[in-house]
């Protein structure tokens, strides 16, 4: 219903962007101006033939008429307006939806302005802390989005699928005659013959804590001996992307319109990582194996000699229009709750500006390291997801090197859950058994959560000093008369 409600405004925006009046567009569509006016004001539904005609006349991709981008903007603005800074304005969910429907550009401008405000606020607090400690300090931020946020948005905008890099990976596989049995020597030989790069595995003490180092002038790549074979394969493929796929990488980075050199460099790293995953896990073979193994991550890792995290990340890239895998969402968190990687093709919404819901199983995964935990997760709007989570350990180092652990969360909408081996034995019909979760406390409307840390955005706190409910922010049930 939401997508239909927003369609009229999209037609109006696209028409205005082309500089057309309603009469002019109606004439090109072969309908009356009054009928087009009804469409633009959501008083007539758009049939499939009319949608195709609109896309043709307005020279717009059909994706422009989809609801995903508007839904994302609504979700992010809802989170923005949950900030106490806006509390006195009394904005409600319908106000935000109306803003996105009528003027998404203004909504995006509000979002950009809030990011700048948050960055400036964080900078000022950090500066005050340094000054209070009489520490040396330098210049601050210019208020633009952090590089990792820009890159994350870029990947999400492309649905984490880059056909250009898939084609480059397929070309490499054919040229270098890659096979899983002798992958490393083939990659090393390709670097030497095609790019004049020599590869050397060096002792850990000589590496000085660096896992991979490329010296452009000497055309020399060194890898630390602490890297296991699957990580060496990944780093070799990553280096091939940097030296052999430069035109494709440059074109994609330019398309991203990143605001800083750091963001552009980080984007190149992310895209080179994508290429490496595509080399180690070729699209067609990997998708076929995933379906045959019912997305068993560990079995896929054994077959393609890749890590748990690498397999999870590759699963999220299977978005080729004519050969799609299960649409997953993915996140990686540390034990403090910091999200260092996120992507969603499932419709799952992540918090960007605050803490996340502690009831997600990705956080409880730290209680049982190395074991896969499953969860039926139900959002406040009734959408239900099937999620798995497991901790992973960053490899490399010896006895005296502290271990670094993350938790990887992977999930899909419940309609796809039967395709996953992890759903065997789970009663997917019993939605009452699903764990109620939210995006974040301020955005969650549930008032019966013992783990609520903040009051919900749309409700007053209503503190009663004489009564204690499930938590400080949960009102107790009324006492029967």
Image: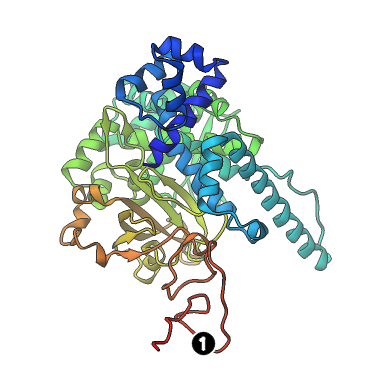
Task: Label 1: state its secondary structure.
Answer: loop
Residue at x 25%, y 37% (from the top left corner) = 286
Q: Check the image and report above or below for 194 versus 131.
A: above
Give the percent coordinates (x, y) of residue 360: 39, 63
**Residue 44 in sight:** yes
Q: Which residue is mark 1?
A: 467
Q: Nearer the viewer, residue 270 or 280?
A: 270
Give the percent coordinates (x, y) of residue 441: 50, 64
Q: Check the image and report above or below for 279 versus 33.
A: below
Q: Check the image and report above or below for 156 versus 245.
A: below
Q: Is residue 140 left or right of residue 184?
A: right
Q: Nearer the viewer, residue 6 or 137?
A: 6
The quarter of the rendered structure image containing the N terminus is: top left
Residue at x 57%, y 45% (from the top left corner) = 148
Give the percent coordinates (x, y) of residue 172: 36, 24
User: Which residue is most to the front?
Assistant: 34
Which of the 4 image quarters holds residue 49?
Answer: top left
Which of the 4 image quarters holds residue 278?
Answer: top left
Q: Nearer the viewer, residue 380 or 113?
A: 380
Q: Nearer the viewer, residue 315 or 425?
A: 425
């Amino acid at each position: 219903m939401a997508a239909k409600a927003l369609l009229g405004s999209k037609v109006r925006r696209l028409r205005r962007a082309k500089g057309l009046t309603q009469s002019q567009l109606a004439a090109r569509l072969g309908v009356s101006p009054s009928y087009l006016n009804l469409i633009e004001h959501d008083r007539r539904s758009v049939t499939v033939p009319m949608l195709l005609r609109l896309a043709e006349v307005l020279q717009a991709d059909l994706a422009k008429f989809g609801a995903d981008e508007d839904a994302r903007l609504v979700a992010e603005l809802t989170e923005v307006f949950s900030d106490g800074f806006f509390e006195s304005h009394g904005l409600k969910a319908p106000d935000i939806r109306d803003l996105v429907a009528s003027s998404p550009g203004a909504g995006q401008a509000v979002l950009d302005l809030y990011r700048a405000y948050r960055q400036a606020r964080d900078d000022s607090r950090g500066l005050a802390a340094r000054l209070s400690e009489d520490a040396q300090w330098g210049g601050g931020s210019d208020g633009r989005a952090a590089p990792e946020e820009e890159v994350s948005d870029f990947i999400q905008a492309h649905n984490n699928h880059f056909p250009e890099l898939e084609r480059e990976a397929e070309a490499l596989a054919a040229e270098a005659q890659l096979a899983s049995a002798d992958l490393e020597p083939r990659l090393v030989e390709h670097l030497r013959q095609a790019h004049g790069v020599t590869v050397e595995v060096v002792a850990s003490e000589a590496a000085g804590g660096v896992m991979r180092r490329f010296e452009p002038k000497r055309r020399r790549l060194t890898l630390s001996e602490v890297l296991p074979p699957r990580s060496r394969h990944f780093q070799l493929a990553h280096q091939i992307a940097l030296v052999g796929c430069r035109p494709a990488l440059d074109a994609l980075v330019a398309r991203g319109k990143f605001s800083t050199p750091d963001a552009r460099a980080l984007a190149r790293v992310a895209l080179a990582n994508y290429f490496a995953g595509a080399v180690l896990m070729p699209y067609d073979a990997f998708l076929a194996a995933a379906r045959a193994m019912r997305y068993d991550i560990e079995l896929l890792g054994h077959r393609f000699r890749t890590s748990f995290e690498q397999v999870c990340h590759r699963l999220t890239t299977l978005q080729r229009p004519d050969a799609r895998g299960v649409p997953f969402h993915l996140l990686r968190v540390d034990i403090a709750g910091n999200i260092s990687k996120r992507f969603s093709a499932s419709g799952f919404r992540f918090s960007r500006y605050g803490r996340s819901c502690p009831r997600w199983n990705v956080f409880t995964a730290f209680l049982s390291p190395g074991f896969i935990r499953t969860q039926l997760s139900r959002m406040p709007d009734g959408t239900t997801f099937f999620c798995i989570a497991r901790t992973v350990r960053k490899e490399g180092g010896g006895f005296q090197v502290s271990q670094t652990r993350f938790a990887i969360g992977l999930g899909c909408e419940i309609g796809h859950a039967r395709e996953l081996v992890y759903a065997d034995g789970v009663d997917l019909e019993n939605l009452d058994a699903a764990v109620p979760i939210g995006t974040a406390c301020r955005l969650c409307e549930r008032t019966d959560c013992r783990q609520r840390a903040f009051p919900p955005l749309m409700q007053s706190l209503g503190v009663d000093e004489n009564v204690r409910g499930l938590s400080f922010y949960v009102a107790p049930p009324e006492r029967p008369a």
